[in-house]
Image: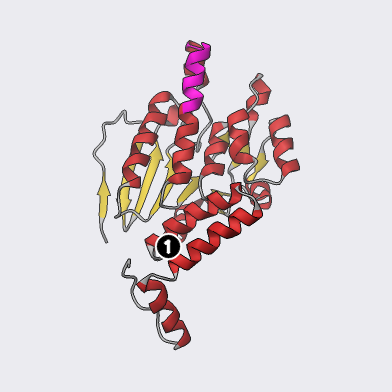
Amino acid sequence: MTAMTRPAAEESVLLRHDQDGVATLTLNRPDQFNSLSVALLTALEDEIDALAKDDSVRVVVIAANGRAFCAGHDLKEMSADPGLETMRDLFSQCGRMMTALTRLPQPVIARVHGIATAAGCQLVATCDLAVAAEEARFATSGINVGLFCATPMVAVTRNLPRKQAFEMLMTGDFIDAGTALQYGLVNRVVSADQLDQAVADLAAKIAGKASQFVAVGKQLFYRQLEDGLEAAYAMASETMACNMQTDDARAGIDAFIAKKPMPPWTGR
């Protein structure tokens, strides 16, 4: 078992801990309910860039300290300088960070407790997978303060059925973890005392797969969702054909046909 915790000052807004191929990024603004300040967005961008080049990391977990997962953007920071260009820069930065998570080769799991509102709900929706504690609650609540959750809408509408997403966006009402599971916003709901174990189990299951196929599969998953049916099948067919050329695929299929144990992944 190997572990690495990146040295960080007490005021660091983002913490990173690596263990057994899983990198955990922990939002660390508990007094502000982990709202996405410019500093936190920048720290997330930097770590995502580093993770994209780190072959030792197979899965990424996004967690949070304190009572909440993430309460969205830092409204106090926004109010201090609400100029058009400043706001354009802020939301463009947030969009870049969310897009980078989707483009990251490693699957990303959200570990959700407390509330996930507005851009915090967007972050959950953007992560490839999500495990929530039973007490977790979710909302796209900007409309309640006169600020329609336009950027959270992009991620939420790519996860939820249309009418459920529209209701969340138009009412700003909270949904509980069970409803989030029903809507498809999260994959699992567990008791708070089982949250860490459930996340660890899911991460370990994915980390045990061949990273090259996981990365290719994640990239294709999102590309084909955005294309028409014929283009999606064309991309998927090419990916499968190339996949079949690898030593790992051939060895794995041979083992399956022969009813033998799967050989270790070689990465070739």
Task: Find the magenta span and give its range.
Answer: 81-92
Q: Which residue is mark 1?
A: 213
Viewed as shown, does residue 98 lie left or right of 43?
right
Mark 1 residue crowding within 10 angstroms, few (<14) / some (14–19) / many (20+): some
Occupied quadrant, residue 203: bottom left
Image location (x, y in percent) of residue 15: 34, 39
Image location (x, y in percent) of residue 31: 44, 27
- Residue shown at 60% from the left, 54% from the top: 231
- Residue shown at 33% from the left, 53% from the top: 57
Judge whether 215 appears above or below 37 on screen: below
- Residue shown at 47% from the left, 50% from the top: 109
Q: Locate the N terminus by quadrant.
A: bottom left
Q: Is residue 225 magenta?
A: no
Occupied quadrant, residue 176: top right
Viewed as shown, does residue 244 lie left or right of 114?
left
Q: Is residue 83 magenta?
A: yes
Magenta stretch: dominant SS? helix
Image location (x, y in percent) of residue 45: 38, 35
| Amino acid marked by disc 1 | Phe
Q: Is residue 113 visible?
A: no
Q: Residue furthest bottom?
A: 258
Q: Is residue 153 visible?
A: yes
Image location (x, y in percent) of residue 195: 49, 53
Along the line of sight, which residue is nearer the eye, 238 or 221?
238
Q: Secondary structure at mark 1?
A: helix
- Residue shown at 48% from the left, 45% from the top: 102
Q: Locate the C terminus by quadrant.
A: bottom left
